[in-house]
Image: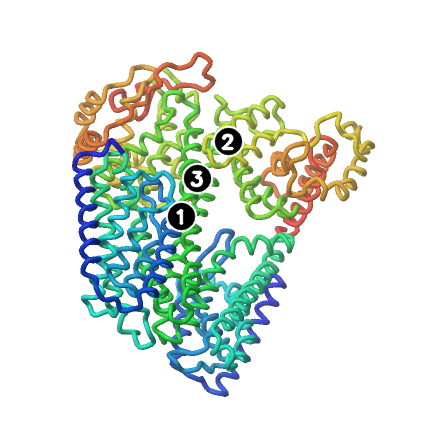
Amino acid sequence: MDPGQLLLLAAAGMLLVAAVAQTAALGLTQPRDAVAFGALIAFGELLRLSLPGDREAAPIGSAGGLGYALVLQIGFVPARQPAMQVIAVTAVGMTVGALPHLAAGRPAGVAGMASRLLAVAFVAFVFRPLSGLAMLSMHVWVALTVMAGLVVAGWFAECLIRALIRADALRARFRVALVDEIRVQWQLGAAVGASAMLIALAADEMGLVALAILIAPLLVTQVAFRRYAGIRSTYLQTVRALARVTEVGGYVEDGHSHRVGRLAVAVGRELGMNEPDLLELEYAALMHDIGQLSLPDPIPGGATVLVSPEDQRRIAELGASVIEQAGVLDRVAEIVRCQDRPWRSTGSGSTGSGSTGSGSTGPGSTGPGSTGPGSTGPGSTGPGSTGPGPPVGSRIIRAANAFDDLVGGSTDRDRTTAALERLRLDTATQYDPGVVEALSKVAGRRHPARM
Amino acid sequence: MGRLSRAAWLYMAAVLTAAAVLLACSIYLHRRLDLGVSRWILILLVLAILFLVCDSTPTTLTSRQSAWSASSSATLAAVVMLGPLGAALVGVTSLLSMRRGLYVAQRAFNAAMYTLSAFAAGQTYLTLGGTVGVPQKSSFPGIIAPFAAAAAVHVVVNHGLLSGMLLLLPPPESARRARLGVHLPLLLVSDLGFATLGLLIAALWSLVSIFAAVLVLIPLFVARWAIGQFAAQERAYDATMAALCQAVETKDFYTRGHSERVSRGAAMLARQVGMHAERVEAIRYAGMLHDVGKLGVPTKVLQKTGPLSEEELAAIQLHPMRGLEIVRQIGFLEEALAGIMHHHERVDGKGYPLGLAGDEIPEFARVIAVADAFDSMTSTRSYRGARRIDEAIAELRKWSGTQFDPVLVDAFVRALDREGWDRPDTTVVPPGFAGGMSAQDHDDPTAPLRVVESR
């Protein structure tokens, strides 16, 4: 397990033990409300939701926990539960709701539960001590403002935790991971926050009935999100599956598309690409050979790096026009179209890499070739790479494709080193040095782990 | 809108008249207001604006005509706070909807529909003992049961009036209606959600007045956003799948568009035999992908003009299995996979790959087999021209009971009568065409693959 995740689990675990112990020692205040909120949280945990990018959320559970932390009065009776009780009830509810998942053989999702618990704990610690203030119950606007601020802060803290874990696990950059997290979570976060505030407000007049009623709108949100996430994953599965037709048709080696797809995404992440761009990159990488279907017969050997530049050009063009047919993947088509373009068209290399002008003639140029990327990498892979030369996605696919053509499914370390060496030799014109450097990092990471 | 049938116009006129009469009567009869007039009008205005905002930015599901919106939460809040008349008046504002591309007749019909359903909901609420007015602390939980009934009536009247209209529309609309059926569970769940939001707006009114509407709107808009994203993704998905299937077909000039037509034909037949909307959707995808494994068949085998050797025949007969191999990892219904694998089985058991007979063949496969053969016969092949529809039907009937399921053949003919069939119009191969063209078609029941006699 990753160290970041371990840290998170340790923090959540300690909090849980402390909260349960204290609640057990002091006894439950207003047990009926505690049980109702606990049941709501368990129900929400049961209806977990997967979001795009292998994420999990439990909107109803989160709204229940936050609502319990924020509630001022339930059915005209002031709610007096301390923060530790909120945490204990949330944790127990989550655990109960997670049990059926475990029984069905699904992963427990402990990390997700821990980050949700910490968000609730944050809000509870700040708000519970304030809840007795007369100002809050007298002026509903003040209460609303405080609640809204806390909900946003709690949500942000949760995003921060998730991004930390994700950056750690996927080796993405933290800042990129945080922006990705916020982009994926903010809509659902807004719905959860608004619902939590509604629960807290409505419980005063409606009593515990408010919980039952407030589930419905969030349930709609949840159903809608589930379908959205479902079609997203079916989409990816379908592209992955149909990319294999080139393999079944004997146009490329078995597993080529998948390997290039995985490699390209890892390289893109290493270069700091965000998730929407990575998805497009993965689509393009999976379908980069689809143009070969338009050739009457497979090119002997199949490996694109070894065929003539004219054939490469044709395959790229044909592939792009296939993808353009869909009418919704124009940027993917553009990436596929430019995949055969050299990183730098010959003759225009006027920058500091002048000494590598003779790179293709001898091995002597490997020295500058491997030190150069450090300085050119970040500049050439900026997010808005609309400057001269092919888009960064095309450059990544070009390098990943060549690498896989040379190495194939093999995990042999010498072969990997030789292939990387060959790519480095061509960084003067053919391959983006920054991309090749990232590729070698990715490849270097994979091999020790596998042996 | 000129292509509306007489019945549709009559129906629309009836709905409009009913709404107008109802509105006029209830304004006339409505003498006493429970709230002060000015407060009543303030609430009406706020709810009408809420209604308009929701109605003007609907989520489209596959077509502009079947757009739907979250406006029912405003209507139902009006049922509680303003009574039947107020609810009906909120519904009338649909006339002013800022949705683009609405015909005047559509606007009028929508407004009448919302008026009638809102009024019906309001009456239900009153009849069951719900108190009209801004709910006070003592109103709960007493008003929940009448409100739930009112919400149910609202949904039923609304969907009833709408489907009445859709039924009377010409065929393209009815095809859309069938796709709308897929979304029906989602629509019903969301109606439930919107109804509760309506109650919430009413309940929170005394506490935070207009702010209640804002707070309640947030989850609502998020849900709508997600549904919109879902619909957009689904359209993108369909387009991508079609493009990829087309790429597989480019190998052979004559089979261009085959997958898409088989997909349409299979879905048409599936609807005709009354399959559930979700299964129709699955068979659409299965039909699209049924020949994807053909790519594993060497081009020289597909383009061979003479009789095939045993090995070559085996290569062709392997394609359903190759297709399954490719498609297996997509999270489809199990049935769709079975449909792809068995679409060349014959009812008499002489098909491939397993030689299943009769009911052993999965229903999806039997459906796809009919559509597949029909499209093959009505398309041009290198060795013959395209057959006319009636000739192809005669062929289907001839093989009914041996190759095809007779029940399905009959159903397919009925579906053809109702919905028609678009034959591909490409008949001439352009001179510079780079791809190949097959000399034999494994889908054509009238010209079985010729095999060298083994000695």
Q: Can you identify the residue that label 2 sits on?
A: A290
Tell us which disc is closer to us: 1 or 2. 1
The residue tagged with tag 2: helix, strand or loop? helix
Image coords of residue B181 (percent x, y): 28, 46
Q: Can you identify the residue that label 3 sits on?
A: B236
Please, what is the three-letter code of the amino acid marked with disc 1? Thr
Please, what is the three-letter code of the amino acid marked with disc 2? Ile
Cβ atoms at labels 3 and 1 below 8 Å apart: no
Quadrant in the picture for residue A277? top right
Residue A432 placement, left or right of B319: right
Question: For this rendering, which residue is in front, B257 or A443?
Answer: B257
Please, what is the three-letter code of the amino acid marked with disc 3? Ala
Question: What's the residue at 38%, 55% (across, down)?
Answer: B49
Residue B56 placement, left or right of A412: left
Question: For this rendering, which residue is in front, B92 or B148?
Answer: B92
User: Any mark on residue B57, and which?
Assistant: 1
Say yes or no: labels 3 and 1 on the same chain: yes
Give the class, few, some or many, for how many residues have Cα within 10 Å of label 1's Cα (few <14, many ≥20). Answer: some
Image coords of residue A315 (percent x, y): 55, 26
Q: Quadrant of the N terminus of chain A?
A: bottom right
Question: What's the residue at 48%, 41% (across, down)?
Answer: A240
The residue tagged with tag 3: helix, strand or loop? helix
Give the class, few, some or many, for how many residues have Cα within 10 Å of label 2's Cα (few <14, many ≥20). Answer: many
Chain ID for label 1? B
Tell us which disc is closer to us: 3 or 1. 1
Residue B18 placement, left or right of B111: left
